[in-house]
Amino acid sequence: MENCLFCKIVAGEIPSKIVYQDDHVVAFEDIHPQAPVHLLVIPTRHIASMSDIQPDDGPVLAQIFTVAKQIAHERKLEDGYRFVTNVGPHAGQSVLHLHFHLLGGKPMGWPPFPPR
């Protein structure tokens, strides 16, 4: 996708602090971290959101989760971490490229947002 921010990061057109990259997955530091560790883990192929996942995307999704687990271990997040994706504007998805937030390094409560 020519105007996709994350596709441009994958292509190297926009600088980012990449912590992992292979043919199918890229992980990089979030520019507005919400926790001491806040990384984004994305597929290299453009998938707009979880709503657009197809059955044949299974292997790349497995790789995304494997990479997240590896990074969490490297960042010493054994006490716990959160791995989430937002789907659509009402959930807070601001970039239309499937991405998962890996958050950790501090205690996190539930629910994640205060009740209204």
Image: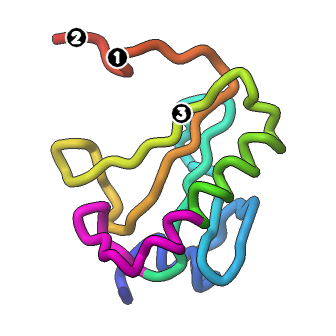
Q: Which amino acid does label 3 sit on?
A: Arg
Above or below, 77 against 60 in this view is: above
The residue range painted magenta reads 46-62
Q: Is mark 3 on a helix, strand or loop?
A: strand
Q: Mark 1 points at which residue?
A: 111
Q: What residue type is labelled 2?
A: Pro
Residue extending farthest to the bottom is: 2
Total numbered labels placed on residues in the image? 3
Q: Name the residue under label 3.
A: 82
Looking at marks 1 and 3 on the same chain, the residue that comes earlier in the sequence is marked by: 3
Q: What element carries label 1?
A: loop
Spatial separation of the CA atoms under disc 1 and disc 2: 8 Å
Q: What residue type is labelled 1?
A: Pro
Above or below, 90 against 109 in this view is: below
Q: Say which residue appears at 57% left-offset and 74% top-offset.
A: 9
Q: Please name the predominant secondary structure of the magenta segment in the image.
A: helix
Q: Quadrant of the N terminus?
A: bottom left
Q: Say which residue appears at 65% left-offset and 19% top-offset.
A: 106
| Pointer 1 with pointer 2, Cβ within 8 A | yes
